[in-house]
Structure formats: C-alpha cells, structure tokens
Amino acid sequence: MHKQHTRPTARVLSVIFVLALLALSTSLASAQPRTVTTSVTELAKLTASDGATGDEFGYSVSMSGDTVVVGAYTDEDNGDRCGSVYVFERDAGGSGNWEQAAKLTASDAAEDAFFGWSVSISGDTVVVGAHGADGKGAAYVFERDCGGVGNWGQTAKLSASDGAAGSGFGAAVSIVGDTVVVGAPGDDNSGSNFGSAYVFERDAGGAGTWGEVAKLAASDGIENDYLGRAVSVDGDVALVGAWGADHIGRAFLYERDAGGADRWGQVAKLTASDGGTWDLFGSSVSISSDTAVVGAYGDDDSGDMSGTAYLFEKPGSGWTNMNETAKLTATDSADSSNFGYSVSVSGAVVVVGSHGDGDNGTFSGSAYLFKKPAAGWDDMTETAKFTASDCAEQDYFAWSVATSGAHIVAGARQDDDNGEGSGSAYLFTHFTPAAWVYLPVVLRSAP
C-alpha cells in the first residue's frame, strides 16, 4: 500500500515563511547591530496654563509612567525667579491627551530661590530642587493625593545638615522609590567648591520623615570639582557627576551598604578613555539598573563643543574603576552642538540632548535616540534623530530630556509660544518594527 502524501496548505506555508523571516531578521541584527530602524513620533506639546515671558518652562523635565513634571525656575508668581513646577498627566478618560494636573510652588516661596531648576519624579512622589532657597539651597517633596484626591501637596522640605551659603544644594535632584539624592556642587567643607551630594530616605528618623542618611564625597576630591553638578539614583546605586578643576571631568558611583549598613560608600570612579581638557565629562548623568550614561558636551571630536556621551555597563564582578563600554556620537555633530548636555537612560534605551544643533536655526536643538543592539552596546551613532514639529531658532530643544518606557520628554526652555523665553516641553513615543508584526497580515491573507 502506498502512503498518501498531502501538500502543505497556504496557511502552513505562510507560517513557515514568517518563521524564516524572523530567523533572517535575527541573523541580520546580530551581523549588523547598528541598523535598527526606529520611529519617533511626537504625541503632544506641553505648555504652562499661565506661561509668560521669561519663565523658561522646560529647563528641567522628568517622567514616570503617565506623569510628566516640568520645571520653570524663573516663573515670578511669588517674586523674581522664585520658580514653579507643572505636573501633566495622561487623560484618565482614555482620550490619550496629556493635561496639566497641578502647579507646584514652595510653601515658603521667595525671590531668587530658583525652584524648579531641577526636578525628579518616581511614582507618586516629586522632588524639586531650589538651589537659591535660603541662600543655601533646598529640595521640596510633593506627593499625589496629599490634601485630597488628585492634589499634589508638599510633604517635606529637605536641607543639608551642614548646609552653608553658596553650596547650591538642590542644583540637581533624583528620586527612586524611597530614596532621594540631592547635589550641592558649591559645597566647600573640604575646600573651595569641592562639591558633594546628600542621600535622604523616607521614614528615616520617623514615620513620614525624610531623613538625611549619608553625605557623598569624592575619594580624590579637588577644589572646583563641583561634585553634585548632576545626580541620578536607581535602586541601591547613586551616580554623581563632577566636571573637575581641569574640566576633563569624572563621575562617581556609590552603593548602599558599601563599607557598612547604609554607608553609601564609593565603589567606582568613571572616566573617559579619551578624556581631554574642557570635555566636561560628568556634566550630565543617568543610571538605570546596570547601565550608566555620562555626558561630555564639551568634547571636540567633531568640532569645538560638539559633545559626546559615554556608556558604562556593570561588570559581572560588580562596579569597579573602569573605562567605558561604548562611546555614543551623533552622525551630524558639529561645532557648538552640545551633544550630551542632557542624557537619560531607561533599560536598553538612551536619549541624548543636543540643544546646540542647528537643523532649524541656530540653537534650535535636537535629540538622539540610541537602542541597545542585539550584539550588545558598542561605539555607535544614533538609532534615530528627532526634534519638535515647530522647532525654531534659539528654542534650545532638548536642553533637558527624560525617558520612561516607550516615552520621551524633552524641554525647550526658550520656545516663545507664550512670550519670549516662556518655554515648552514635547512628549514623544518610539517604536521599533519587528518581523513578527507582519504575522497577522500574512495569516489573514492565507486561504
């Protein structure tokens, strides 16, 4: 008896074809890790409901989930340069609109406080830096639903235990969960402008109290180091930038419990393998899990102040003094691009701001997206370049950037929709097509 042979159906053939396509795309990704195609789409333009000339809305930005925070440090509601911060949330009604939910000001707002110079959000908690407050600087903590549902109420004012005039406490802030890090680049307890950073934790010293648990300093600090110019915290690791008296710059990593319980000891010093004078390495920093990014907007590889950014990955044996895993650059970087003035990393995505880019006029600005290649991080140019739909000369787009999940927010502190220098911020989403997205189409077309 002869066996009966059946021919595969068109649907089966389609599945085989798609599986082959997936295998091919994976092979190509491994062979050419820099050819990822990513689409960046502008979702919304954010402006203050009461925006006015000179507010510089967008000087600082931060994002967590469906909430965006934007600083306007020169807003004058309570005096010259007292500052304010705006909170935007995705429309709870499901329309997808991003709407202003609150305007935050300090309970003791005063002139020249610069409230909003720095901002950071984690979940339902916002921290705002005001490096001019009280002459020494301060940071303010706000929480969602404090004082009523949907209300963002101030719950704490943070200051350094040894704060002094001119320390600049609050020039940089970062929060994750129950931990806040505040930079004080002008701190001079060890000498002129050595700089430092302070760690605060929720409930330290009592329920509901944000207590100072550590002061961070460089193991080899020098005068005019300005440690604390930039800070970032994730989990049990804090990253602090210091561009140094020689302006070559470096960054320091601190870990909770390193050297003892809650000691926050220094575990690594990060430097660029090709660092040079006036590179300003450490002027911006960001850390996410085992990936740290440090900006050096003064680097001159592609022209004076063209800028670069460096990426570091945690070795298997733990953080240690090391050179970079990768150097990130722009394909079209030029004089005064200031690429790396702002950086943000979330998982396998890095965003680098270049507010000096001139595609739409002098200092119109742009931002660059980098996605980790299948073969791992390597020296590379951008996956995508993007800017605002209405970007114009001297908008300084991407002066500040932040990324969370599939979203990016970028500040344009000199945009003039509400008057010269009123400022704005833009929200984007990014998407990388993959072969599998074609599977439903192929299957639907099969008989």
Image (tube, rainbow, N blue to C red):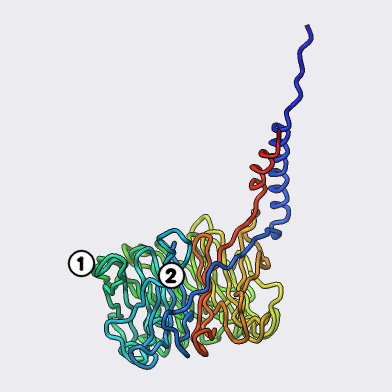
In percent of width and height, residue 207 lies at 21, 65
Residue drawn at 34 percent across, 78 percent down: 104
Residue 300 can be seen, yes or no: no
Q: What type is the residue that disc 2 sits on?
A: Glu
What is the crowding at mark 1: few (fewer than 14 residues within 10 Å), some, or many (at least 20)? few
| Up/down of 188 relative to 23, above or below | below
Residue situated furthest top in the rendering? 1
| Up/down of 185 relative to 92, above or below | below
**Which is nearer the eye, 43 or 307?**
43
Q: Along the horizontal axis of the image, is 56 left or right of 162?
A: right
Quadrant holding the N terminus? top right
Residue at which label 2 appears: 99
Q: Which mark is residue 291?
A: none
**Which is nearer the eye, 53 or 295?**
53
Image quadrant in which you'd find residue 118: bottom left
* SS state under label 2: strand
Residue drawn at 71 percent across, 75 percent down: 332
Residue at which label 1 appears: 206
